[in-house]
Image: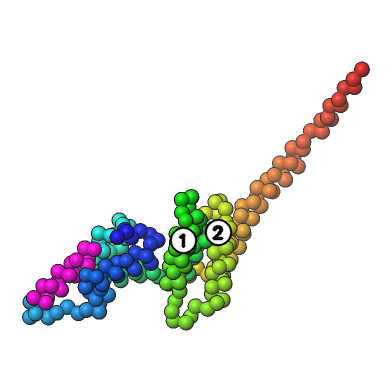
Amino acid sequence: MPTLGPAEWADWQRKANAYFRMNELHGIVHSTESSPSATEKEASANYLKRRGMAAGFISMFIDSTNATYVKDLEEDPAKMWKKLDGIHNAKSPGMRFNALDTLFSIRKEDTEDLRSLMTRAEAAMNTYQSLIPTDGTFTLQNLQEELVTMSLIRALPDEFNHIRATLGVHANLTLAVTQQAFIAEDNQRQRIAQPINTALRTYTHYHPRSNVPSPTPSSET
């Protein structure tokens, strides 16, 4: 079982769910199995044992960053799962951008065969698809705008990394928000450049360059 890192939720949760089903823990994790009454001592003891197993499994196979998300929830696997799902499977534009960025960043490894390459690409697309809202609000126009947004952000050189970072955590990343950020950055750079240009013109006015004649080449005798 792989450890859950920052960008492996789709594959990790599929494997985790398979483990839960194999060990009769799926209902506990997904809150479809209710706790037996206190009078059913044997069933209640078994439930608590399985609940501890599920919580232990989640704790064992998440990295230190994810562990901070579920701190103080270690006794309740259903709450742990819901918290992790809310973080990694948030159907937000920023999360979809990251998923598309991962998809279009895929490159064939030197020792990788083409079947493995196709599998990785399909897994990345599945991750993106899992982040699309299923309530009918996501349209073809939304997809087109997100692709343009991704293209603009990916086109930025390293000197604009501060914009990439800001937009990457924006709660409502849209094409309009991206365009506004670009325009604001352009305006800021122009304001900074104006006094510099004025100073250069002033300096040139009061310190004109000397008109030293260029030496003429000597003629050969």
206 or 134: nearer the viewer: 134
Mark 1, Cα crowd under 10 Å, few <14 / some 14-19 / many 20+, is few
> Could you say where residue 51 lies in the image, as x and y percent from the top left?
19, 70
Instruction: Kindly identify which residue carries mark 1.
Output: 115
Query: Which quarter of the rendering shows the C terminus?
Result: top right
Residue 203, given in percent of the width and then of the height, sits at 71, 41
Residue plotted at (31% across, 58% down): 3
Label 2 CA crowd tier, 10 Å (few <14, some 14–19, many 20+):
few
What kind of element bears circle 2?
A: helix
State the residue at coordinates (52%, 78%).
139
The residues colored magenta run 42-57
Residue at image position (83%, 29%) is: 214
Residues at marks 2 and 1, CA–CA distance in whole angstroms: 27 Å
Label located before the other in sequence (2 or 1): 1
Give the number of the disc on residue 154.
2
Horizontally, is 134 left or right of 14 in the view? Answer: right
Q: Which mark is residue 94?
A: none
Residue type, label 1:
Arg
